Image: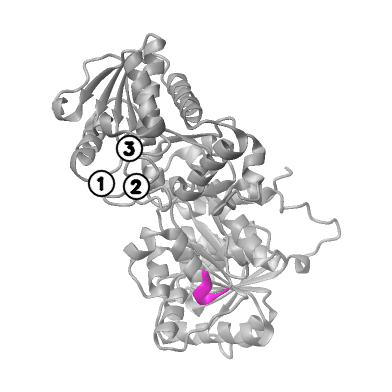
Amino acid sequence: MTDFATRLPRNLYRAEQVRKLDQLAIEEFGFSGFSLMRTAAAVALNALLEKWPQTRHLQVFAGSGNNAGDGYIVAGLAREMGIGAQVIQVADPQKLKGDAQQAWQWAQQVKVEMIAFADFDLTRATDHAHAVVVDSLLGTGLDRQVEGDYKAAIDHINAGSSPVLAIDIPSGLHADTGQALGAAVVADLTVTFIGMKQGLLTNQGRDFIGELIYHDLDVPDDLFTLDSAPLPAATRIDINYASRYLLPRVGSSHKGSHGHVLVIGGDYSFAGAAIMAAEAALRSGAGLVSVITRSSHRPAILARRPEVMVLGTEDENPQLESLIAKATAIVIGPGLGRGPWARQLMQSALGAQVARDTPLIIDADALHLLAEKNQQGTGVKRDNWILTPHPGEAAALLDCSIADIQQDRFAAVRKLGATWGGVCLLKGSGSLICASEQQPQHVYLSSEGNAGMASAGMGDVLSGIVASFVAQGHPLQQSLCCAVCIHGEAADLSMQANGQRGMVATDLLPYIRQLVNPSI
C-alpha cells in the first residue's frame, strides 16, 4: 500500500455529498464559506511547501468557481510569505460569485500578479527557478468534456516540466467516476478536502492524482454523523481491514478444519492458470486443495505443487461428481476455455451449487459461459457465489461495452450485483466490491495494488485466495474483501522489493503467506 493511502479516510463520497457536507459545516457549525476556503488554501500551500521546500514561485491557473477561489488565496498567502505568485485567469474574474469573488478581491488587495489567459504566452515556459504550478481550474462539479481555453490550459500544464499541485481534484477528472473528461491535469500532488471523493481512487483517478493528501478543514467529527449528513457512497478498504479477520488458528486444528478448495480449469495449453489458483489457495490457508483438469496436466501440477490432489478428466472412470461433492468451495474458470469440455464442467459446478449449496467462485472463461446463459434467456441469479470479472468480462455479463463499464465503475458493480446476485468484484485500479444482499447496496473500494499487476495470471491467484477464505468459513463478502486487499498488498510488497516491471503472478505467493499471518 502506498504510504499516503494509510492516512486516507475510510468513508468515500460523491461530489454532491461533499457539497452537502460543506453546506452543513456552514449551517450547523457556524463556519463561513470564505473561512473554509482560506483553510483549504493554507493546507494546500503548506502541503506544497512540505513536498517542494525550495519553491520560490507559484504559477496558479484559476477558473470560474470556488476551486478558483482556493487558487487566488493560495497565491495571496504565498505572496505574504515572500514567494512569487502569478495567477493565470482562464475565466473572467468579474464573473466570480460569492466566496470565490471575495477570494479574488483579497488577492488583489495583497497585490498578486494576475494575467488573462488570452494574454498568456503558452509557448513560453516559466523562467522562474523552483517554480510550482497550482491547478485551480475546475472543481468537483465538472460533468462534461473539457474544451476551449480550459483544455488548452490543461494541455499546457501537462506539457511543462514544473511540478504540479492540484487543489481538491485534478481539473478534468470526474469526482464520482474517476474518468478523465477529455483532458485532465496530471498532478504530482493532490490535496482534497472535507470528504474523500470516490473517483480519486479508482478508474483513471490514480493516473492523475500523484500523491494524495486529505484534510477535513478542521470541521468537527460530529459533522459526519449528523442525521442530515449524507451516508458514505463507498468504503475504502486495505490490508488493515483484512488483518482484523485473520485470527490465529486454534491449537487443535487439522486439515479438515480449514476447508477443501476445488479448482476446475486448465484446458489444453492452459494448465498454469489452474496451478496458480490451487497454489494460492494453499498459501492462503486452505486445508485441502484439489484440481479437476486435463489428465495430461497431472505431472506438471505435481512437479510444481505435490500437495495438490489432481483428478484428470481423461482418467479411467474419473469420479468427478464425488470430488465435487467433497468441496467446501469451488473455483471454476482459470484456464477453463469455452469449448464442450468447459461447458460440461461448468454445468457440473452449477449443479453442485444447487444440490449442496456449495459456494462458487466464478472467474475468467467461466464468466463468459455464464454471460452466454443470460444472452440465451436462461440466466441465473444466485446468492451463494462470487463473480470476479475484469471490465471486459463485466461487459459480457451486462451485455454492454467496456467503455460503458469504465464510464461509471460504481454503477457497473452495483448492476452486476443486482443482475447476478451474490458478491461481485469489478477488477481494475481501485477494485470495487458489491454485495447484493446489502440494501441499499454498498460498495467497497480497495486502495491496494499497483500497475505491476497488469500481467498474466494475477486473476488466477486472486481466485485461489478468495476460495481459500470461503472454504475456511468466512462469509462471502468478507472473503472477497480480504482476498482483494491481501492480493493487492502482496503486489505492493513485491513492487517495493523488485519494482513493477517484470512482476509475475507467482511472485506474490511468498507475500501472501506472510500477509495471512498478520500476528507474525
Q: Position of residue 488 (x, y in %)?
A: 53, 50
Q: Which residue is mark 1?
A: 146
Q: Is residue 358 magenta?
A: no
- Identify the element where label 2 is drawn: loop
- Identify the element where label 1 is drawn: loop
Report the residue that reaches farthest toward the right: 252
Q: Label 2 vs label 3: CA separation?
A: 16 Å
In this rendering, the answer to whether 104 lies above or below 256 is: above
**Label 1 sits on what residue type?**
Val
Q: Quadrant of the C terminus?
A: top right
Per the rendered image, the range of residues in magenta is 417-421
In front of the other: 347 or 428 = 428
**Label 3 sits on what residue type?**
Val
Q: Position of residue 205 (x, y in %)?
A: 40, 46
Q: Is residue 111 left or right of residue 24?
A: left
Q: Is residue 426 visible?
A: yes
Q: Is residue 420 magenta?
A: yes
Q: Is residue 150 left or right of residue 268?
A: left
Q: Label 3 vs label 1: CA separation?
A: 14 Å
Q: Position of residue 426 (x, y in %)?
A: 47, 62
- Between disc 3 and disc 1, the foreground one is 1
Q: Is residue 502 visible?
A: no
Q: In the rendered picture of this protein, how many numbered marks are placed on residues?
A: 3
Coloration of the structure image: one colour
Q: Which residue is mark 2?
A: 142
CB under 8 Å between discs 1 and 2: yes
Sequence-wise first label, 2 or 3: 2
**Label 2 sits on what residue type?**
Leu
